[in-house]
Image (cartoon, rainbow, N blue to C red):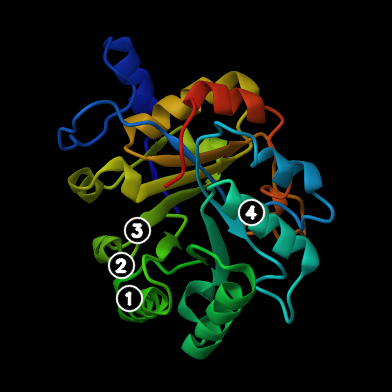
């Protein structure tokens, strides 16, 4: 779900000679803030070795990458994922373990058990809580989970992947919130919630699939205008019946056809 701007409204603004996209005023910051890339997870390293290898290239502005072995950490250590996680860690890329919250329906004990496996086997730097609820009623359990994950790992980085604008209170539980996940046709007319203006761009991430190459610059401009600090754009689209590495119904499994162009447009960066 997203906040959409009617096409008619955009046309009226264009005719008036004004900007086509409104955004809340953000707090002044010192110096320009770069965009970073958050990779929501490729296919298994055995079938997507090139994609994972590209993340090791020096200068890629990566904020994090999600490791999803088998809709979680799997039942036992996976040798391919062990190797990839080790190489990414050595290259300074923040690796997040994929935890499917199932919109709040996943039992707390299962999430904590999976988190332990990710830490013990793959030495992850934090966690990606996929299908995180957006409603106020789901906040207490998400806060409990996030606090527990930080108790398991000092300085754990927690991304709450809502995929839509959540209740504002969630921002206090996650280091970053995925406030948009969906199609380019929805994203280009989307609007951010006004409360996000009270927080810096590094607190928000946008994941968009089906972005045509000619519209890549426009997508980057929208992300900056709407105050996202981390993005992932791909020209891939969901496959019917597919389950993506971290959502997206398969759209994230392969690398975008214009990966090098994204990296060059955003510019070099260093993961923290």
Which residue is at the front of the view, 60 or 176?
A: 60
Q: CA distance from mark 3 to mark 2?
A: 7 Å
Locate residue 56 relative to residue 12 in the image: left or right: right
Which element type, helix, strand or loop, lies under badge 4? loop
Q: CA distance from mark 1 to mark 4?
A: 24 Å
Q: Residues within 10 Å of mark 1 (few under 14, many from 20)?
A: some
Residue at mark 2: 173
Which element type, helix, strand or loop, lies under badge 3? loop
Residue at mark 3: 175
Above or below 257: residue 37: below
* Pointers 2 and 1 in contact (C-beta within 8 Å): yes
Q: CA distance from mark 1 to mark 3?
A: 12 Å
Residue at mark 4: 41
Residue at mark 1: 143
Which element type, helix, strand or loop, lies under badge 1? helix
Q: Which mark is residue 90?
A: none
Look at 65% across and 30% down and name the residue there: 259
| Residue 144 picture quarter | bottom left
Q: CA distance from mark 4 to mark 3?
A: 18 Å
Whichever of callouts 1 and 3 sits on the residue coming sooner in the sequence is: 1
Which element type, helix, strand or loop, lies under badge 2? loop
Whichever of callouts 2 and 1 sits on the residue coming sooner in the sequence is: 1
Residue 112: x %, y % from top left: 50, 83
Using the rendered image of the protein, determine whether residue 163 is visible from the camera's viewpoint.
yes
Residue 109: x %, y % from top left: 50, 90
Whichever of callouts 1 and 4 sits on the residue coming sooner in the sequence is: 4
Using the rendered image of the protein, determine whether residue 245 is visible from the camera's viewpoint.
no
- The residue sitting at the right extreme is 47
Locate residue 175 relative to residue 28 in the image: left or right: right
Between marks 1 and 3 in the image, the one whose residue lies nearer the viewer: 3
Look at 40% across and 79% down and name the residue there: 145
């Amino acid at each position: 779900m997203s906040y959409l701007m009617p096409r008619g409204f955009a046309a009226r603004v264009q005719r008036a000679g004004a900007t086509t996209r409104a955004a809340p005023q953000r707090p002044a910051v010192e110096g320009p803030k770069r965009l970073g890339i958050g990779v929501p997870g490729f296919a298994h390293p055995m079938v997507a070795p090139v994609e994972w290898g590209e993340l090791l290239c020096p200068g890629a502005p990566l904020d994090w990458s999600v490791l999803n072995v088998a809709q979680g950490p799997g039942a036992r250590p996976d040798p391919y994922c062990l190797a990839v996680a080790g190489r990414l860690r050595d290259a300074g890329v923040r690796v997040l373990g994929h935890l499917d919250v199932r919109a709040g329906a996943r039992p707390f004990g299962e999430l904590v058990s999976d988190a332990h496996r990710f830490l013990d086997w793959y030495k992850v730097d934090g966690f990606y809580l996929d299908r995180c609820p957006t409603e106020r009623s789901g906040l207490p359990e998400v806060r409990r989970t996030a606090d527990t994950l930080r108790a398991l790992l000092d300085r754990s980085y927690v991304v709450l992947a809502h995929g839509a604008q959540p209740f504002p209170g969630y921002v206090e539980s996650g280091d970053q919130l995925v406030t948009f996940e969906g199609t380019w046709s929805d994203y280009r007319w989307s609007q951010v919630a006004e409360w996000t203006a009270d927080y810096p761009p590094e607190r928000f991430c946008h994941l968009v699939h089906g972005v045509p190459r000619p519209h890549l610059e426009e997508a980057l401009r929208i992300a900056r205008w709407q105050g996202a600090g981390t993005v992932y754009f791909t020209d891939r689209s969901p496959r019917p019946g597919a389950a993506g590495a971290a959502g997206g119904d398969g759209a994230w499994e392969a690398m975008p056809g214009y990966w090098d162009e994204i990296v060059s447009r955003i510019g070099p960066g260093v993961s923290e």
